[in-house]
Amino acid sequence: MVDDENIKTTVSPFAIREGEIKTFDGKDGYVSINQIIHKINLGHISDIHFQILELVNEFEFMTSRQIYQLLVQKGVDVKSQDKLNNKLEQLVKTKILTRYFFTTEEGRGIYRIYCLEKMGKYLLTSKEIDCKWQPTDNTKTVGMIKKRLAANQIIIAYARKSSNFDSYTVKPQITAKMANKSFKPHGEVKLSKDGKGISLVFECVRREQDWTVKLVERLKLYKDFYDNFNLGDSGYQIPPQIIFVCEDDKHMIETFKEIVVNKISIDKVKFYFTTDLNQNTTTLEKSLVEFIVDETTGKYKAKNVEIKFLK
């Protein structure tokens, strides 16, 4: 597998492409639970298959590369990406997992995504593992899926590259008090050092249809949460740091412009920005950007923020 630092692409694989659709790449037909139990009894479906299932259950949509990186991070001996791909193929053939890829008029995307199937839920619940998957989960839009994939990559990057990494939450829940509405950032990472800790919550922004409208709606919920924050709200002792994850540098500017135009400011927290490809660097301490006012021109400009805590 190519290391993150050696990936040469200039366009994020999780960016929205014009006219993009999700295409089924799983298996049709019927597989009985008795057939699957027989494979388990023969050892053809083993503990590592269940570890894969638990990850996909936790993250909802994943690429094979993401599954591989997280298994390695958790200390699972996967052998190689090819070996993992063979196991994923077994899970797809038995309809425990299913698979999709993205296509446009220009052709097929470079990766496939994996998610649960009904049989996968049966197996997880049989081991008393909480599984809230429903068949309708697999009908989510391209934009929703790519936000999930981008958030996955952020979590993986911090887990692998930050010496201060403590833990992650795939779908943290935050409550906007005045709106009386709970919502979920796309991921959370907790960092700790010398008894001090900080939570980073990630809001992944994609250039999907009506993305600016959706962004403003989310920003209003964040503002409600931060402006009315009290100790212990949503489980936080101090307000978490919000980071907007954008498709590219231009998209960071577009996202910040929407914040300014809609006059959304939060006194208690700074807005930091990053891009998908910034997670491929060797270290993350220079991966964030802040927009500040240039004292000479009076206009906003992007400034790289060096945060040692991310090292």
Image: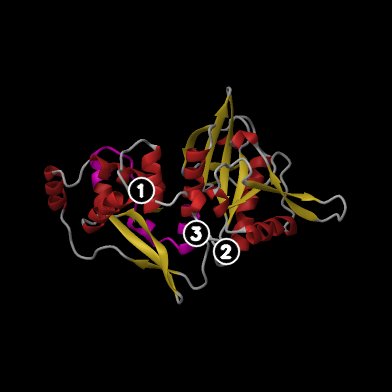
Residue beneath the point at 48% across and 58% down: 146
| Labels 1 & 3 near each other (Cβ < 8 A) | no
Disc 2 versus disc 3: nearer the observer: 3
Span highlighted in magenta in the image:
123-148
Disc 1 versus disc 3: nearer the observer: 3
What x and y, as percent, mark residue 173?
A: 51, 42
Q: Amino acid at mark 1?
A: Val
Q: CA distance from mark 2 to mark 3?
A: 10 Å
Q: Which residue is mark 2?
A: 207
What x and y, as percent, mark residue 188?
A: 52, 41
Residue beneath the point at 37% across and 48% down: 67
Taking the view exactly as shown, the residue that stands out farthest to the bottom is 105
Q: Which residue is mark 3?
A: 14
Q: Amino acid at mark 2?
A: Arg
Earlier sequence position, callout 1 versus callout 2: 1
Quarter in which the C terminus is drawn: top right
- Residue 79, quarter of the rendered image: top left
Answer whether residue 131 is magenta in the image. yes
Earlier sequence position, callout 1 versus callout 3: 3
Q: Which mark is residue 278?
A: none
Left-right relation of 77 to 153? left
Dot 2 alpha-carbon crowd within 10 angstroms: few under 14, some 14 to 19, many 20 or more: some
Decide which of 231, 200 is in the foreground and name it: 200
Q: Amino acid at mark 3?
A: Phe
Q: Which residue is mark 1?
A: 56
Left-right relation of 289 to 112? right
- Residue 177, quarter of the rendered image: top right
Residue beneath the point at 23% across and 41% down: 126
Answer whether residue 77 is magenta in the image. no
| Labels 1 & 2 near each other (Cβ < 8 A) | no
